[in-house]
Amino acid sequence: MEKVYVITGSTSGIGKAILEKLCNNEDSVIYAGYRNEQKIPSDNRKNVKYFYIDMNNRESVIKAAEFIKTETNHVDTIINVAGSVVAGPIEKIDTQRLREQFDVNTFSHIEFTQNLMPVLDNSKIINISSMSSFGIFPFISPYCASKRALDIFFNALELENHKNLKIISVKPGVIATPIWEKSVNANLQYLESCTEYAQELDFIKRNALKNSAKGLSVSKVADLIIKIDKNKNPKSSYTIGKDAKFAQIMSILPQGLLNKIIKFGMKYRMNL
Ligand SMILES: NC(=O)c1ccc[n+]([C@@H]2O[C@H](COP(=O)([O-])OP(=O)(O)OC[C@H]3O[C@@H](n4cnc5c(N)ncnc54)[C@H](OP(=O)(O)O)[C@@H]3O)[C@@H](O)[C@H]2O)c1
């Protein structure tokens, strides 16, 4: 039987890898979200229908859901992938940037799902959260908080809804994708203005650029998503990567002890 998927953030990294795997099954129809038309592949597959969505723009999110509802009366699986990283010390961060982070990583996914509710029933919603949702990474706390909030809001949706929706949070560790370089470019000007934190931010920047290459491959995450989609009774949360599993274990320590370990770890690594 035909399966209908909706995926956001399908033009790069993890989303692109998931889309490539999904469209191998010709019995599937996949609605794939893009924000940059130039990134739509020219060898577009017959079972993929691209739609425009800008997660930073409410109107565009609502329009995207409207488009999908005119195309189909049932969606089997939504895969919420689109995301970005806002970084910086909380002492200095412009709260407008915090709002933008939540718009892209959290609120837009809620709004998109709310507007797709009429075509959801016995459906799965797979959110690409992050190990950052465990909340233990300094200088990217806007990102951590947006992912934690995403998990909390969607868990509430599973508890509250009457439509047998299964919500799954996937929390990858570091994955080799362009997100790291994009985040450095997007945050650079602002980070350079935080002179009091120059040493820490330089460390964070170098680390982010290393992550572009050293992370797990996107195909590992895509394989996990395919497995979760096929599973009739998936778990509510999956971590992927040794670093994500480590973050999960660390997050259960008492906050005071955890903070001491993180501060020590940062100092030690910055002096290497
Ligand atoms: N890479 C990691 O280490 C890692 C770890 C844990 C979780 N994640 C999460 O995995 C998801 C995918 O990230 P990725 O690593 O694959 O990064 P990526 O390669 O940069 O892909 C992000 C996708 O989201 C889209 N996007 C970003 N901002 C958007 C906006 N305002 N409106 C619409 N689309 C937007 C991007 O569009 P463009 O192609 O036009 O840029 C791209 O398709 C994100 O939610 C991220 O937080 C990543």
Image (spheres, rainbow, N blue to C red):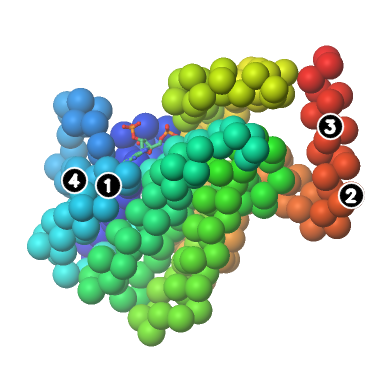
Quarter the C terminus occupies: top right
Disc 1 CB within 8 Å of nearest ligand 1 atom:
yes
Q: CA distance from mark 2 to mark 3?
A: 12 Å
Residue type indicated by callout 4 = Phe
Disc 4 CB within 8 Å of nearest ligand 1 atom:
no
Q: CA distance from mark 4 to mark 1?
A: 14 Å
Give the mark nearest the N terminus, 2 or 3.
Answer: 2
Residue 46 % position (x, y): 14, 42
Q: Is residue 2 visible?
A: yes
Q: Secondary structure at mark 1?
A: loop
**Which residue is at a point 14% across and 56% down the rendered structure image?**
67
4 vs 1, front mark: 1
Q: Residues within 10 Å of mark 2 (few under 14, many from 20)?
A: few
Q: CA distance from mark 3 to mark 1?
A: 38 Å
Q: Secondary structure at mark 4?
A: strand
Residue under label 1, please give it: 57
Residue under label 4, please give it: 51
Residue 215 % position (x, y): 60, 29
Residue under label 2, please give it: 257
Residue type indicated by callout 1 = Asn
